[in-house]
Image (cartoon, rainbow, N blue to C red):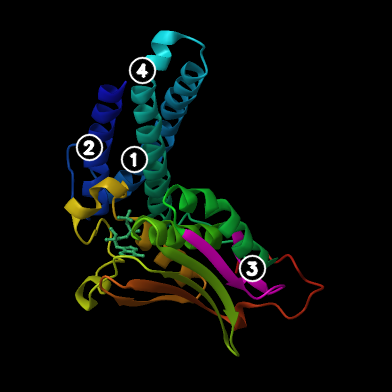
C-alpha cells in the first residue's frame, strides 16, 4: 500500500510540479492550455482511487483481528500519508482552477465572526495534539461580504501553519478586529519565526524555508500561495510580522468597502 501510494504520488507530482513551476513538459501535452486542463483532470481523477484507499484502511482498522492490531502502526502510516496526499491534491486542483480562471469567488454577506469562531473549534484538536494553547479574541457579530468557504480556507491555512511551525507547548491565537476601513484577521504564534529574506519568499509556489527542517510537517509550500490568491480576490492582502525564534503574526487585511451595508440584498452572487 505504502509503496503504491509513494509510486503514485511521484508519478503524479513530478508533471504537476513542472507545470506549476512554469516549465514546459512537452511529452505530456502540447500546449499550455492542454497542460492546465490535464492538471485539473488528473487532480480530479486522483481523488477517487485515493478515497477508496482511505476507506479500505479505515475498514481494516476497525477489524477485531489480532494480526491487524499488531500491524496498526503501518495502517496508521498509510492513513496519515493518504491524508497528506488528499490535501495536496485539493491544493493542486485549486491552483489549476485558479490558473484556468475557473476558480469562482462567490461574494455573499456572512458572519465572519462565527466563521473565525468555527475555525478555532475545528483546529483545537490539532493544537491539543501538540499541546499548543489555541485561544481567540474575536469581535462578535461582524458581517462581511465575501466568499465564506474560500476565506475559511485561507484562515485555516494560516492557523494550520501557526500550529505546524510552533514547537510543542507554544501558543497560537486567532483574532478578528474591526478598524475604520478594514477588517483584520490575525493569526499569532510563538513559533520558529521568519527572517526578512524568508518573509519575502513565503508566498511563492513550492517555497519552504528549510526543507530539511520542515520535512516532518508534511507540506509542500503551496498553502500561503493559495491563501494569498484568495485574499487578493477580495482586494485584501496578507501582512507578516515575524521575529526568528520568537514567533509570527500573519494578518489578513480585508477592505470593508467589500461589505454590503444594505441588509435587504444579502445574497449577491459573483462580483
Ligand atoms: P507549507 O506549510 O505546506 O510548507 P506554505 O506555503 O503554507 O507551505 O508555507 C511556506 C513556508 O513558509 C513554510 O514551509 C514555512 O517554512 C514558512 N511558514 C509558513 N507559516 C509559518 C509560520 N507561522 N511560522 C514560521 N514559518 C512559517
Q: Is residue 267 above or below residue 126?
A: below
Who is closer to the viewer here, 64 or 55?
Answer: 64
Most prominent secondary structure in the magenta stretch? strand
Q: Is there CB contact under 8 Å for labels 2 and 4?
A: no
Characterize the local packing of mark 2: few (<14), some (14-19) or many (20 or more) Cα atoms within 10 angstroms.
few
Q: Which-is-in-front pick, marks 2 and 4?
A: 4
| Residue at mark 3 | 112
Q: Quadrant of the C terminus?
A: bottom right
Characterize the local packing of mark 4: few (<14), some (14-19) or many (20 or more) Cα atoms within 10 angstroms.
few
Q: Gap in Å between the C-alphas at discs 2 and 1? A: 9 Å
Question: In the image, which residues are magenta?
Answer: 133-148
Q: Is residue 215 above or below residue 110?
A: above
Earlier in the chain: of badge 2 and badge 3, it is 2
Mark 4 residue element: loop
Q: Gap in Å between the C-alphas at discs 4 and 3? A: 44 Å
Q: Is residue 198 visible?
A: yes
Q: Within the magenta stretch, is there residue 137?
A: yes
| Residue at mark 2 | 28
Q: Which residue is outermost to the bottom?
A: 180
Mark 1 residue element: helix
Please provide percent x and percent y for residue 107.
62, 66
Q: Is there CB contact under 8 Å for labels 2 and 1?
A: yes
Give the number of the disc on residue 71: 4
Give the number of the disc on residue 38: 1
Amino acid at each position: 500500500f505504502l509503496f503504491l501510494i509513494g509510486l503514485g504520488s511521484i508519478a503524479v507530482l513530478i508533471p504537476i510540479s513542472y507545470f506549476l513551476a512554469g516549465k514546459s513538459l512537452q511529452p505530456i501535452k502540447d500546449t499550455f492550455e492542454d497542460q492546465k486542463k490535464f492538471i485539473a483532470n488528473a487532480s480530479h481523477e486522483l481523488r477517487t482511487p485515493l478515497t477508496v484507499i482511505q476507506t479500505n484502511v479505515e475498514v481494516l482498522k476497525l477489524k477485531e483481528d489480532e494480526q491487524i492490531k499488531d500491524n496498526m502502526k503501518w495502517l496508521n502510516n498509510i492513513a496519515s500519508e493518504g491524508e497528506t496526499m488528499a490535501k495536496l491534491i485539493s491544493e493542486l486542483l485549486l491552483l489549476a482552477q485558479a490558473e484556468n480562471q475557473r476558480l469562482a469567488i462567490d461574494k455573499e454577506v456572512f458572519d465572519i465572526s462565527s466563521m473565525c469562531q468555527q475555525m478555532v473549534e475545528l483546529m483545537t484538536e490539532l493544537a491539543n495534539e501538540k499541546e499548543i494553547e489555541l485561544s481567540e479574541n474575536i469581535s462578535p457579530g461582524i458581517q462581511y461580504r465575501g466568499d465564506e468557504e474560500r476565506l475559511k480556507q485561507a484562515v485555516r491555512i494560516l492557523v494550520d501553519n501557526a500550529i505546524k511551525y510552533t514547537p510543542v507547548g507554544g501558543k497560537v491565537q486567532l483574532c478578528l478586529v474591526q478598524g475604520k476601513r478594514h477588517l483584520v484577521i490575525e493569526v499569532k504564534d510563538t513559533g520558529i519565526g521568519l527572517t526578512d529574506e524568508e518573509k519575502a519568499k513565503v508566498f511563492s509556489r513550492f517555497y519552504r524555508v528549510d526543507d530539511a527542517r520542515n520535512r516532518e510537517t508534511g507540506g509542500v509550500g503551496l498553502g500561503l500561495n493559495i491563501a494569498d490568491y484568495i485574499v487578493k480576490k477580495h482586494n485584501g492582502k496578507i501582512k507578516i510580522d515575524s521575529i526568528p525564534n520568537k514567533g509570527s503574526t500573519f494578518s489578513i487585511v480585508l477592505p470593508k468597502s467589500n461589505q454590503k451595508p444594505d441588509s435587504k440584498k444579502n445574497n449577491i452572487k459573483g462580483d
